Image: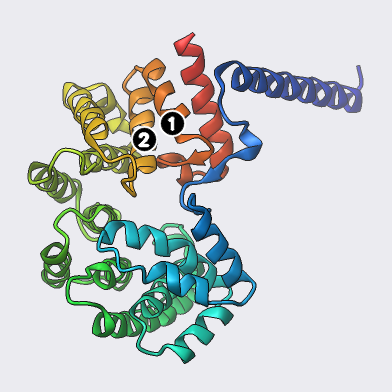
Amino acid sequence: MSHPLLIVAVLVLLIRLGLWLNKRRKSTEALTGLVPQAELVEAGSEPADPAARAALDAARAGDWRPAAALLSDGATDWSARYVRMSPFSDLAATDDTWLRQWRQEQPDSSEAAQVHADALVKLAWEIRTGKYASEVTREQATGFHRVLQEAAEASQEAIRLAPAGDPNPWVIQQAIAMGQGWSHERYHELWAEIVAREPHHYTGHTGALQYWCAKWRGSNELMHEFADKAIAGAPAGSLLTVLKLRAAWEEVMRDKTAVSLYRSTEFTATLDAALADLEAADPDHPGIVGARGWIAYGLIQNGRPAQAMNQFRRMGREIAGPWIYYGNPAAVFAAARTKAARAAG
């Protein structure tokens, strides 16, 4: 067989293999009742609440009023309010026409100020990209720091306008602290502002874990110390036990030789604690889908993939957990579900 014909033959075999694997995956999805891969979305990218979806659609069309009504509903579940705001700041990071109109007509709106600050944070990190610092270009770094400084200034205005008990403007500042390299002392002051207003703020704690991890401003030891302390003081159902699962992932991602910790007695105990925490959590907890994702991942790594199936089913069409950090989240998430489904029989 000539060289060109050999290449063609190999390509045909690869195509057939891909078609067979795709067919097998679809068969697994059908048999287990899982949402098809094509319908998967990243958690938080689309609001589950119909009113929130309608407000987001209105904002896309240029009408800020439904967003203003939704985000200023008076509820004081600050973790839930932060999560509710996120899709709107995502939108504002790409198109802020509606937000600028909102700010012009309601200059003292705390909610608008927070969306503005959070959108600038997200835009800054989009400019930087998720690459390691050594891989970020000078142009990207310059743009990142310029926009991040704008975000820092906007966050101060958000703090000024916020109600006394609202921790969310300080939660927004956590990504600024990482990007600008705030000292441990300065970060402790920021953290004190958050927990004084909401001791168990879910997004606040996940943001703090990032600050304390080795790839940013801490170390494995400081990261685990933070997670342990947070969990020790948290009530059942807070879902802060998931911090230890995230910390393990951060450690392994930085040092692949640490992968054995997933099969350790300590990690197994952490998983069991997280499952109990999940059982005690309010079904409307803003971090519940993310917690299910981290627990499912942990169960697979711990050698208990069959137990992950319940979490995958409960997650529905939302991708959460470490899979969102991969280049093709839907594909790697679907592959993990398939592994769990086969283990469950």
Amino acid on which the number 1 mark rests in the picture: Arg
Type of the residue with mark 2:
Arg
Residue 162, above or below 243: below
Q: Is residue 116 visible?
A: yes
Could you tell me if the residues under marks 2 and 1 are in contact, i.e. CB atoms within 8 Å?
A: yes
Q: Which of disc 1 and disc 2 is earlier in sequence?
A: 2
How far apart marks 2 and 1 lie (CA) works out to 8 Å
**In the image shown, does 343 or 113 lie closer to the viewer?**
113
Report whether residue 216 is seen: no
- Pick the residue in front: 177 or 115: 115
Q: Mark on residue 8?
A: none
The quadrant of the rendering that contains the N terminus is top right
Relative height, residue 93 to residue 200 (above, below): below
Label 2: element kind: helix
Left or right position of 23 against 264: right
Q: Which residue lies under the disc numbered 1?
A: 314
Q: Which residue: 42% across, 78% down?
A: 116
Please give left or right for residue 65 compared with residue 221 in the image: right
- Which residue carries the number 2 mark? 292
Q: At which x and y percent is residue 67? A: 48, 71
Question: At which x and y percent is residue 341?
Answer: 50, 17
Q: Left or right of 261: which side holds 28?
A: right
Quarter holding residue 11: top right
Task: For marks 2 and 1, give the one nearer the viewer.
Answer: 1
Instruction: Say few, some or many: other residues with alpha carbon within 10 Å of mark 1 (under 14 / 14 to 19 / 20 or more).
Output: some
Along the viewing direction, whichever of 202 and 125 lies nearer the viewer: 202
Q: Name which residue lies at 46% across and 52% down.
A: 44
